[in-house]
Each structure stands twice: as C-alpha cells, then as structure tokens.
C-alpha cells in the first residue's frame, strides 16, 4: 500500500477493481459466518473474486472460512457475498476486519445481512436455534477509533437502531409463515479466540446478553456509520448455560452451524427477496 493513500482512496481503489470486473451493482451485502458458507449455493454467481485479488483487502486464513467475494443474484436481487470473513482474533485490526464492509458500500449496497455462529447464554435456547439479533453489546475495540472520514459518516454515529427494526419485524413474520422457530436476543461481541469460562458466560447473561460470538459487532458499527441498514442472524452452536456447558471445539461449532444452516438459509433468502430496496442506492465514484 502506498503510505500516502487515505482510507477513502483505498476503499475507492478496491471498489473500482471489483466494479471493473463486473457490471452488476449489488444492493445487498451478505457476510457468512463459521460453518455457514453453503448459503452461497443459493446465489447465481456471476463472478467470484478471491480476497487476495482485491487491492487492500485483508486475506482470510481461518479454517472454515473461505476468502472470496461472490457477485451474483439471489432471486434476481443483485448481491455481493463475503464467503468467509476475517476476525480480530486472527491478528487483523478491527479496521481491517471491517474494510470489506466499507468497500461494499462503494459497490452500492444499502442493506447488510450477516450470519454467525454463537454460544447461547439464554437458558431457553437449544443448540441449533436461530436467533434474530435484536441488539448487541460490543466488547471489542470500536472500529471507528481514529480519524473520522466525514464522507463515510459522522464522528459520533447513532446506534439506537443498529439492527434495522423493519427488517427484524419482517424476518419475524417470515419465520412465522415458514413455521420456523426463531429466537430473538442480544449478541455480545468478544475478541476470542478462547471460548468463555462459565463465569464469563454468566457475566454476559447478567449484563443482558443472550448469545456470544467473535464477529458481527464491528462490521455492524462500520455499516451503521455509513448508513447501511443491518440485519443479523446467529446460529446457536453451543450453550453457556449453567449445568449445560460442554467441552467445546471449533469443529463442534462448525458442525452445529452447518446442521442448522438450511433453516437459516430459508429465512434469509426470503427476507432478502421481499424486503424493500430504495431506487436510489447509487454511489457516485470520482
Ligand atoms: N463463544 C464465543 N464464540 C462462539 C461461541 C461461544 O460459545 N460459539 C460460537 N462462537
């Protein structure tokens, strides 16, 4: 990277590289979490671009996370999908973790749909449950720390509707129509990579959390900074509930996520199909 380049210049260079490769202009961005990458099979892919090909993109590395940007359509809606994301625990900065979301804005997205695997603290939850994220508690570094680029968004962005009320409501109605049991709750975003101790799960429950995971919150903060509407689903892959905790591995998380994935995909696919998109989603490039 040329050291003199500003964040905005880098974002535009990344977006221009992608837009030069394809004529499609996505209106929705989708970020797929651990064990949840097969949602990509629902997409009619027109172009697959590996993260490593895009200038300034962080390179994904973790097992279970394929680092590719898919451009295509989902029920004729133009979408961009991040198959695999990068995480703070991999050693990337939070800025790097969120960088692809910045670029998606400049590809033209107006809505961002995120999925993740999470541990459930709510004693009513079961492994394999799908949770609509109502709200979050961020326990990671805030990705907006540092100089603010006014063209991207305000210095002090509002977070009163971090997860779009209309999208949550619509998703709830779709789930009812599909006879799909969904949970609703607060997602606690932590750095990881160690899973929680029993005392930590208890603490996260006490402070108002229903589920805990190592992603999503930073991307949502950055998306809200730029005015993108967000919707997120967690798949509950393990329980941090007293008396029900088990020895946990990443393979167990991935397996539980993959098993619940079809339910999640059914809901997400319908939501992306029927939610409204404004006509004016144009981003002007210089
Ligand atoms: N804790 C944190 N992250 C996770 C968990 C968990 O229990 N399960 C899946 N991701």
Image (cartoon, rainbow, N blue to C red):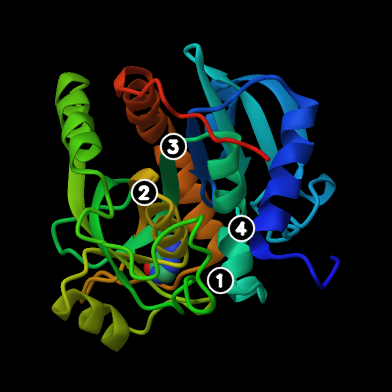
Report the residue marked by disc 4.
99
Which image quadrant is residue 241 in?
Answer: bottom left
Q: Secondary structure at mark 4?
A: helix
Q: Quadrant of the C terminus?
A: top right
Report the residue marked by disc 2.
235
The answer to whether one can see residue 67 in this image is no
Q: Which mark is residue 261?
A: 3
Which image quadrant is residue 26 in?
Answer: top right
Q: Which mark is residue 94?
A: 1
Residue shown at 18% from the left, 42% from the top: 165
**Crowdedness of circle 1 by 10 Å Cα count: few (<14), some, many (20+)?**
many
Q: Please tell me whether mark 1 or mark 3 is closer to you in this view.
A: 1
Residue furthest front in the image = 286
Tag 1 near tag 4, CB within 8 Å: no
Expressed as whole percent of the image width and height from the top left, the position of residue 123 reads: 15, 64
Dot 2 or dot 1: first in sequence order is 1
**Position of residue 137 in the picture relative to residue 42 (left or right):** left
Residues at marks 2 and 1, CA–CA distance in whole angstroms? 23 Å
Residue shown at 57% from the left, 22% from the top: 43
Expressed as whole percent of the image width and height from the top left, the position of residue 53 reads: 84, 45
Expressed as whole percent of the image width and height from the top left, the position of residue 126 reads: 24, 52
**Position of residue 175 in the picture relative to residue 128 (left or right):** left
Dot 4 or dot 2: first in sequence order is 4
Q: Secondary structure at mark 3?
A: helix
Q: Secondary structure at mark 1?
A: helix
Residue furthest bottom in the image = 199
């Amino acid at each position: 990277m040329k050291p003199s380049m500003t964040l905005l210049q880098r974002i535009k260079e990344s977006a221009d590289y992608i837009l030069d490769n394809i004529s499609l202009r996505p209106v929705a961005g989708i970020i797929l979490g651990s064990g949840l990458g097969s949602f990509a099979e629902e997409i009619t892919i027109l172009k697959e671009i590996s993260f490593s090909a895009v200038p300034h993109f962080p390179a994904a590395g973790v097992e279970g996370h394929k680092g590719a940007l898919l451009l295509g359509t989902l029920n004729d809606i133009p979408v961009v999908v991040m198959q695999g994301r990068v995480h703070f625990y991999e050693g990337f900065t939070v800025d790097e973790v969120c960088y692809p979301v910045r670029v998606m804005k400049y590809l033209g997205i107006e809505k961002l749909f995120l999925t993740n695997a999470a541990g459930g603290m709510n004693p009513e939850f079961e492994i394999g449950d799908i949770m609509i994220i109502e709200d979050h508690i961020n326990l990671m570094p805030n990705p907006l720390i540092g100089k603010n680029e006014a063209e991207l968004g305000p210095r002090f962005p509002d977070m009163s509707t971090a997860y779009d009320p209309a999208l949550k409501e619509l998703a709830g109605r779709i789930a009812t129509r599909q006879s799909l049991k969904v949970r609703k709750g607060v997602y606690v975003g932590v750095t990881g990579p160690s899973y929680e101790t029993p005392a930590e799960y208890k603490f996260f429950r006490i402070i108002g959390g229903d589920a805990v995971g190592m992603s999503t919150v930073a991307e949502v903060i950055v998306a809200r900074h730029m005015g993108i509407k967000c919707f997120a689903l967690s798949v509950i892959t393990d329980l941090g509930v007293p008396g029900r905790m088990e020895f946990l591995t990443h393979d167990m998380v991935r397996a539980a996520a993959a098993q619940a994935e079809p339910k999640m995909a059914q809901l997400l696919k319908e939501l992306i199909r029927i939610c409204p998109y404004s006509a004016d989603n144009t981003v002007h490039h210089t």
